[in-house]
Amino acid sequence: MGFGSYDESEQQEQTTDDEDVEAVNVHEHEHHGEMSFESDVSTDELVSQLGSMKDDESDD
């Protein structure tokens, strides 16, 4: 078979030994809670800074 071709015989007898496979717990490091921060900068100033950053990025 050539490069990139599909051979069904390679797909027929694929087995895995479940004893050798460790399960991944996707919730192991999940955190529930809240995040907050305080800033002395007003929302208007932050929006202005964001606009400046976007202008600088479009200049590149």
Image (cartoon, rainbow, N blue to C red):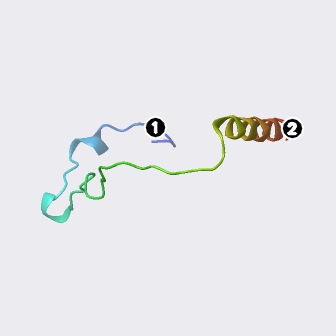
Residue at the image position 21 percent from the left and 62 percent from the top: 22
Q: Is residue 8 left or right of residue 59?
A: left
Q: Residue at x 59, y 50 (%)?
A: 39
Q: Please determine whether, in this image, residue 50 is positioned above or below residue 24.
A: above
Marker disc for residue 26? none
Residue at the image point whose x is 50% and y is 51% from the top: 37
Q: Which residue is mark 1?
A: 5
Where residue 25 appears, x then y in whole percent?
23, 55
Residue extending farthest bottom: 20
Left or right, 53 with reference to 34: right
Among numbered discs 1 and 2, the one appearing first in the sequence: 1
Mark 1 belongs to which amino acid?
Answer: Ser
> Please, what secondary structure does the residue beneath circle 2 have?
helix
Q: Position of residue 33 (x, y in %)?
A: 32, 49
Q: Residue 20 versus residue 9: which sits nearer the camera?
A: 20
Rendered residue at 31%/37% (across/down): 8
Instruction: Tell me: 1 left or right of 20.
Output: right
Which residue is label 2 attached to? 59
Q: Residue 26, image x and y in percent?
A: 28, 52
Q: Quadrant of the N terminus?
A: top left
| Left or right: 25 as drawn, with respect to 56 | left
Instruction: Give 36 or 59, whichever is nearer the viewer.
Output: 36
- Crowding at dot 2, Cα within 10 Å, few <14 / some 14-19 / many 20+, comes out as few
Query: On screen, 58 above or below 33?
Result: above
Q: Among all residues in the image, which is located at the extreme left? A: 19
Q: CA distance from mark 1 to mark 2?
A: 45 Å
Q: Amino acid at mark 2?
A: Asp
- State whether residue 29 is above or below residue 41: below
The single residue placed furthest to the right in the displayed view is 59
Residue 24: percent from left, percent from top: 25, 56
